[in-house]
Image (spheres, rainbow, N blue to C red):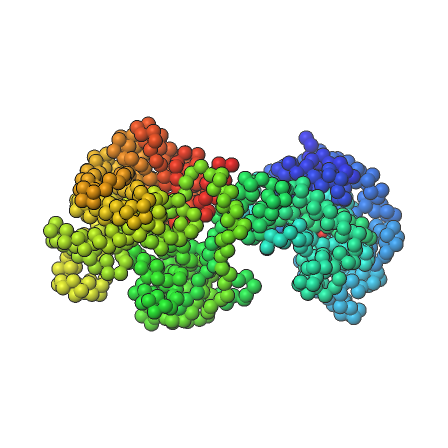
Amino acid sequence: EKWVYTFGAGLAEGGAGDVEKLGGKGANLAEMAGLGLPVPPGLTIIADACTYFYTHQRNFPDELKAQVLDGIGGVEAITGRTFGDARNPLLLSVRSGARSSMPGMMDTVLNLGLNDETVQGLGKAAEDDRFAWDSYRRFIQMYSDVVLGLDHEIFEEILDDEKARFGHEFDTDLTAAEWQHVTRIYKQMIEDELGEPFPQDPQVQLWGAIGAVFSSWMNARAVTYRQLHNIPVHWGTAVNVQAMVFGNLGSTSATGVAFTRNPSTGDKELYGEFLVNAQGEDVVAGIRTPQSLTEVARLESGYDKPAMEKLMPEAFAEFLSICNRLETHYQDMQDVEFTIERGKLWMLQTRSGKRTTKAAMKIAVDMVAEGLISEEEAVSRIEPSSLDQLLHPTIDPRVAREVIGAGLPASPGAATGEIVFTAEDAVSAKEEGRKVILVRMETSPEDIHGMHAAEGVLTTRGGMTSHAAVVARGMGIPCVAGAGTMRVDFRNGALIGVGVQLKKGDIITIDGSSGQVLKGAVPMLQPELSGDFAKIMAWADKTRRMTVRTNADTPGDARAARSFGAEGIGLCRTEHMFFEGERIHVMREMILAEDEAGRRAALDKLLPMQRSDFTELFSIMHGLPVTIRLLDPPLHEFLPKTEQEIAEVASAMGMEPRALSQRVDALHEFNPMLGHRGCRLAISYPEIAEMQARAIFEAAIAAALETGEPVVPEIMVPLVGLRSELDYVKGVIDGVASEVMREGALEISYLVGTMIELPRAAIRAHVIAEAAEFFSFGTNDLTQTTFGMSRDDAAAFIPTYQKKGIIERDPFISLDFDGVGELIRIASERGRQTRPDMKLGICGEHGGDPTSIHFCEDVGLDYVSCSPFRVPIARLSAAQATI
Ligand code: ADP
Ligand code: MG
Ligand code: MG
């Protein structure tokens, strides 16, 4: 079996395509070597050897030793040096390198092969003893840390003491003799600590280092990193054994790191730093201040020492041309590591550079203009969920944060405002033109108007799918949910955080992207939606097949969604209109009415309000499709709950509190999610559906007359399980439609369809499709009813399920393809059997989730509908799903 792949001197056994075997670092070293770039020769032990190591009690495969020694033989031939030779020793670096980069998580050993004898030879060969002893002490430090398990701080303490004794400030000030002295102390300390001397045999050193790199795959840092980034443990790490080149060979030598473009702005400029007479991690370690690569950067950022461009013009020119060559070759911005040994440039690493969303956009757009990549490629390079960063104000990363609490990053963006503890206070503050953060233990539907009035929402309880989180995401306002380190003391009107107690009116800032709660106001960066963003979105729109609609309950939502590019409304939840302002009172009047006549009287008052809402929605959407769902939630959601609320409402309605209380009790349900809601309400109280249908048709006529654009309302009947349910409600709607059209003397077209949110409806889709003109998958309820899991209570056990590996993803956030998805497939197929041109869409939270959107493309849905702020994410995801 082949465990070892070599590279160097313009040849390589592998290349960039061999990442699985060689790891990212090894594959790209091979690729660069193959391109003829100056890469120190070496070999890569494949990642399978790491897996072997762990399945064989940390032993190496039998053939490995011979193959590695063979590879080193090749390196010796290229370099003209011999590993372990006393006169002209070859030194090696032993570097980790997994399939996907895990920066700084695993270990590397440099200058391997040095001992008391070879250090002398190295000094003579380089004619620089100081360099040789500096390299030896570095090796002892690194090897002891990585392989022998001695804390590197012990070494730093010794070094600091000695430096002070010699009267030096910097490591570069030490002479050969002084470094020799330091190594003697190091070795003595190691022998004292471990009871045996520092290993002198280069072969022992080599296999110790290889084993240590494999072992570092399981160190705590690496394990955590893999968990956070979903990297499977079975991948293992490759090991790269490579000839050393030396950046610590005096003032004509250096080491550095660079991005081929600016990773925070995306500007096309070399960006990075280097250090003269240094090695390895010195640049990042911060012992000395590094120097800039270019003169421009030196002038702009105030580096005090000359730039590489000035100091080493020839090496710089070569470096610049290699960077350009790498970009063209990889067709992407690269993050590179390099070393200059006595004026000669060596490339030590290249990979795709990490970047901010803003930079990612700019780089993709620029690369299209430069002819490096296609528009489609540009579209596929942007991570859809990262657009969140762009669409909301964000906290200026340059300012200090005074964190007073933390919770879940439930809805992205940052917001500042005064603390209020009730929805009413939020509304009245807004009316006075003040900005507020609504702080609650948790929120409920009664808080909606307060959430609308607030800049952001903070709760101390609840998870990512809690009411506050879902509603805030829908509204596009920032939310930090379940800030368990904070406490709301309602009685005293206080918010208690880490080391602070704040009261109503105090200013806080919440960061819904990180979950942090900060004291006071903080400078923000505003979103930028033109330029590169607009270009990428235009390319995405050209590419995608599905249309993207929005879930919008208010004119404000609809306007925001239009500005984000929504192509219609996929779901208007009419009940949200009933919580606004005065309407809740009329709504309650309707619900509490003794009989149909009383209900109709209240509905007559609601009719003009609904009609004006719909007229506005229709004119904002200007001829685009608008789907309106009939009243869905159980009626008691609109009623007062606490004794105090009941007393207030009773007096407002001129009712006896006791009578009201009895009526509220009568409406109580044991399991409201499965209770008297959805189309069941329209069947019990057809006058409600009549009123809503009338409001819709009258508004459609009004908007058609006003804008001249014909509106095609799509009326959606919720929670249908039986065809007969839909038949009944459709009968009511059709009746109102012909009445209104006769009255208005105007013919308008409309569709009646249903939400598919019950398994029975999905299975009987071919029959329901005989009555339904469209289906919209209500995946929140469909997930709830398929799993039999209440989504309002799931936060209590879903995290445990995830921790114990019972489920991977929260099905309320990312669609469960196997179960819920299968029902969607079945319903789509069966629905289209009956009605081939039937329009199919999705309107649950999943409509804005990138992986769920890929699924929708596969199933062949016509559109996805999501909250306004996720519209751009959905446009991009829908495009990527077709590429
Ligand atoms: P990491 O994955 O943590 O970046 P690397 O294996 O890239 O670890 O090594 C870190 C640094 O060590 C490199 O940036 C480089 O400065 C130095 N280094 C690695 N290999 C060599 C080498 N062959 N010659 C000189 N320096 C090297
Ligand atoms: Mg590196
Ligand atoms: Mg539903």
> Residue 587 is drawn in which quadrant?
bottom left
Let me know if residue 278 appears in the view.
no
Q: Where in the figure is residue 201, as x and y percent of width and height? A: 79, 47
Q: Residue at x 75, y 57 (%)?
A: 308
Q: Closest to the observer: 308 or 507? A: 308
* On screen, residue 54 above or below 662: above
Q: For the N terminus, which image quadrant?
A: top right
> Residue 661 is drawn in which quadrant?
bottom left
Left or right: residue 91 versus residue 432 is: right
Q: Closest to the observer: 192 or 204? A: 204
Left or right: residue 436 versus residue 217 is: left
Q: Where in the figure is residue 89, as x and y percent of width and height? A: 83, 47
* On screen, residue 361 above or below 329: below
Q: Where in the figure is residue 495, as x and y percent of width and height? A: 39, 68
Q: Residue at x 66, y 63 (%)?
A: 301
Let me know if residue 744 appears in the view.
yes
Q: Closest to the observer: 536 or 168? A: 536
Farthest residue toward the top?
833
